[in-house]
Image (cartoon, grey):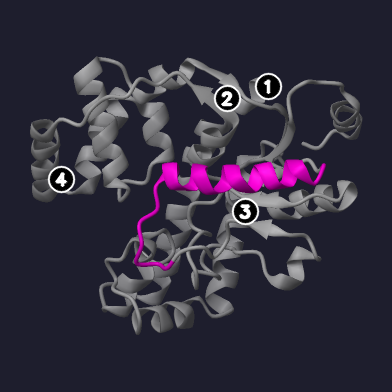
Amino acid sequence: MFDESKFKEFLEKKTEKQKIIVVYGPTACGKTDLAIKIAKSINSEIISTDSRQIFKYLDIGTGKVTENEKQGIIHHMIDIIEPDREYSVGEFKVEAEKILENIFKKGKIPILCGGTGLYIDSLIYDFKIPKVPADARIRQDLEFEREKYGNEFIWKKLQELDPEYASELHPNNYRYVIRALEVKMLTGKSKTDFREEKTLKYEIFFVTPYDGNRAKLYEKIDKRIKIMFETGLLEEIQDLLKKYNKNDFGMKTIGYKEIVDFLEGNMTLDECIALVQKNNRNYAKRQLTWFRRYEKN
């Protein structure tokens, strides 16, 4: 929760490192509102760290901030790629670091806001991760398993070996899953093992609007999903399908792939709404696991 006195201490603290504010937390907990409130109070800019809001046209289902909701605050890293493009953490890091430098040059403290832990970590930590060359045979074997048994199968393999890293990855992000398994097989160390060897690059104020009440969070998620359906989510996806393929990267995100199944007649509308709610609750669960590390700072 936001502590005014600690925030004031952070702002007044003398340090050689550049300062950054990180607003983190699970989906639907109120990150955007808090980030905008802070940005207005210190005349700052927000960098989105949400792996779904990078996609153009995926607005309602990703809970993307509207122009009116921005209240004049500049938001970066939203609507930057087409839904048919894949976008790696490495690409995000390169683009976002340029924006960070520009904000620093203006004498402002940047605010990172979003629920994708991989994106946040890529910016705030210096990782001592050795370059592990790809192994064609291992990848081929894992790809064969994926094609035969599905994305969920190889994700569960990763979950057994590296539950913390798997908690952030959706099973459909199979390239990251395969890479993590490959690194473990080649080095004997998991991605999490490597990530433990890290240092913070900046002086950081971590803050979350999440109050620890999981039951209340799940209620908010369920209500939010209902509102999305009531305010045009189905129509948004029908329009997207006129231009993009259901198998495109953006279309496989939570809240979109389920509706594609509904539109193809594989479930009723009520079943679809319930599934989107369930998948968002599960996503929040994975986020909470990931963000525990920030509570130590």
Marks 4 and 2, the one that precedes in the sequence = 4
- In the image, what residue type sits under mark 2? Arg
- The answer to if 2 sits in the magenta stretch is no
The tag on residue 199 is none
Can residue 115 be seen in the rendering of this structure? yes
The tag on residue 146 is 4
The residues tagged by marks 4 and 1 sit, at their Cα atoms, a distance apart of 38 Å
Q: Residue at x 81, y 43 (%)?
A: 108
* Quadrant occupied by the N terminus: top right
* Quadrant occupied by the C terminus: top right
The residues tagged by marks 2 and 3 sit, at their Cα atoms, a distance apart of 20 Å
**Left of 159 or right of it: where is 113?**
right
Element assignment for label 3: loop
Element assignment for label 2: helix
Q: Position of residue 127 (x, y in %)?
A: 48, 22
Task: Name the quadrant containing residue 69.
Answer: bottom right
The stretch in magenta equals: 82-107
**Left of 125 or right of it: where is 182?**
left
**Nearer the observer, 247 or 76:** 76
Q: Is residue 162 above or below residue 213?
A: above
Q: Residue at x 61, y 41 (%)?
A: 214
Can residue 114 be seen in the rendering of this structure? no
